[in-house]
Image (cartoon, rainbow, N blue to C red):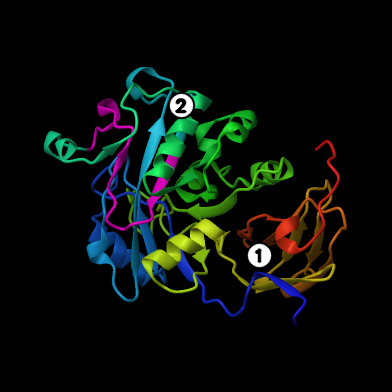
Amino acid sequence: MDNRIYLISPDKKQYKANLHCHSVFSDGKKTPEELKEMYQRNGYSILAITDHETPKSHNELTDSDFIMITGYECYIRPTEGGRGDIFTREIHLNLFARDPENETMICYNNRYLKYMDEEAKDALTKAGSERPREYTTEYINEYIHTAQKNGYLVSYNHPYWSRETEARILSYEGYFSMELCNYSAYIMNHLEYNAPLYDMMLSHGKHVFCHSGDDNHNLYPEDDPKCDSYGAFTMMMPEEFTYGGIIDAMEKGEMYSSMGPTFKEIYLEGDKLHVECSEVVQICVYFGSKIPRHELAPKGCTMTSADFTIHPESRYIRVSIFDKYGKSADTRGFFRDELGMPPLEEQEM
């Protein structure tokens, strides 16, 4: 037991979270109160309402059983005045406030604030440059750095939908996590499950976590196949169920991404990795090679655990599980220094 290094500990309680959500304060159709009721009814304990360019606290809805995370979604486009174009690349970032009362607007630009009236704009607390936004790596990294300085964790949203190149994504610095699955985009394109991109990032030594969210707008009823709620979520494992505990867990990567399955525990003991989970048909361990370790359940059956021997030259370790419906759960990448493994000699990736 003393030699075990836990990637996911059975001693930590897991809380279900949606970290990407829109309300009537931007282009969503539900009020914050309605969204809390919906998600709490469906087994969630944490919700971040991230309305477009609308920093707004909903801390009054937090109680002993449910935590509202303050944040908002920003976007930067190459088009004139930030105009939307379905064929043009752009970047969207979610900003999560360390302080639940922080409603600071980063790099204020009036052309992007189409959901806010003049009175609300005048009342904003602003930080950072107010020059026109530039779709350049330099400006985007400046934006992320400014957000960090002003009390936000920054995540990278829906990379497939954004149409950015791998080279551009690798050039950004300072975001703590990337959306592995964005469910609203996934039900439109069935491509917004970004595990291949995430593995590429890890293989290049990018120390970034992964999570998933609905990005729900609730344009359709909950029983409609186009409903964009409850399809992708993040399981959080904080030391304590408080606002600060959740933010701390996010910053430390004490979370994993899922579209359905769940992990019970994962630990490394020597060169042996043990995985326990809900019922699945396949368990994969990725470590930076062309061929991951994998176990499959017999045809027509399921499995809830597997053991693997870890390759001594693993660049990192990341575990994915897949249920009979093809839905996955995915850990973040754990690098060698976190796992007590000696550094590798530098090799071309």
Question: Residue 78: in sight, yes or no?
Answer: yes
| Depth order, front residue of 128/52 | 128
The residue labelled by disc 2 is 139
Distance from Cα at disc 2 to Cα at disc 1: 44 Å
Percent position of residue 198, x then y = 65, 45
Q: Earlier in the sequence, mark 2 or mark 1?
A: 2
Query: Residue at image x 76%, y 63%?
Result: 340
For disc 2, the neighbor class at 10 Å (few under 14, some 14 to 19, many from 20) is some
Q: Which part of the image, by quadrant, shows the N terminus?
A: bottom right
What residue occupies the far top of the structure in this picture? 80
Q: Which residues, given as a range, are shown in magenta?
A: 93-115
Percent position of residue 293, x then y = 82, 59
Percent position of residue 126, x then y = 26, 37
Q: What kind of element bears circle 1?
A: loop
Percent position of residue 96, x then y = 39, 51
The residue labelled by disc 1 is 324
Q: Type of residue at label 2?
A: Tyr
Q: Is mark 2 in CB contact (under 8 Å) with mark 1?
A: no
Report which quarter residue 329 is drawn in: bottom right
| Depth order, front residue of 234/101 | 101
Q: Which part of the image, by quadrant, shows the C terminus?
A: top right
Q: Is residue 124 left or right of residue 255?
A: left
Q: Is residue 30 left or right of residue 322?
A: left
What residue occupies the far bottom of the structure in this picture? 1
Query: Residue at image x 84%, y 49%?
Result: 344
Question: Residue 258: in sight, yes or no?
Answer: no
Q: Type of residue at label 1?
A: Lys
